[in-house]
Image: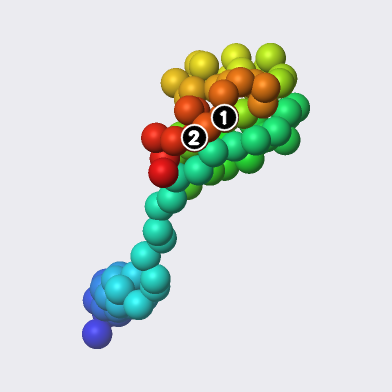
Amino acid sequence: MGNKCIHQLFEAQVELDACEANKMMPQKKQFTCFMIGDGTLVIQCAKHILKQAHQILGMISPDEAVTDWANRKGIPCIQATDNLIDFLSPAL
């Protein structure tokens, strides 16, 4: 058997092993959430959540930077002094 054939067999086995591993791995469950906070930390957390294909239903923050970021992403954002019950009720 030539090196090319051995290499192709190895690649095929690696590909098969990867497929089998994917079948055995638990599937990620997506979730929805609300984010509460201010400053860059809540924005960084929100970016990570969105990157993982989860959904942010809304953000609650007194911070104008958070409100601006949420608005650019199409995420509703309110102040903590606003009517929280009305804001959160669609998720219930």
Residue 69 at what x, y percent from top left?
Answer: 58, 20
> In which quadrant of the rendered image does the C terminus lie?
top left
Pick the front one: 64 or 90: 90
Which image quadrant is residue 10 in? bottom left
Pick the front one: 90 or 24: 90
Residue 81 at what x, y percent from top left?
Answer: 67, 22
Residue 74 at what x, y percent from top left?
Answer: 44, 21
| Residue 11 seen in the current view | no
Label 2: element kind: helix
Q: What is the number of the mark on residue 88?
A: 2
**Residue appearing at x 50%, y 16% in the figure:** 72
**Residue appearing at x 52%, y 16% in the figure:** 71
> In which quadrant of the rendered image does the N terminus lie?
bottom left
Q: Type of residue at label 2?
A: Leu
Q: Residues within 10 Å of mark 2 (few under 14, many from 20)?
A: few
Q: What is the number of the mark on residue 84?
A: 1
Label 1: element kind: helix
Pick the front one: 33 or 2: 33
Q: Are marks 2 and 1 in contact (CB under 8 Å)?
A: yes
Residue 4 at what x, y percent from top left?
Answer: 28, 72
Q: Type of residue at label 1?
A: Leu
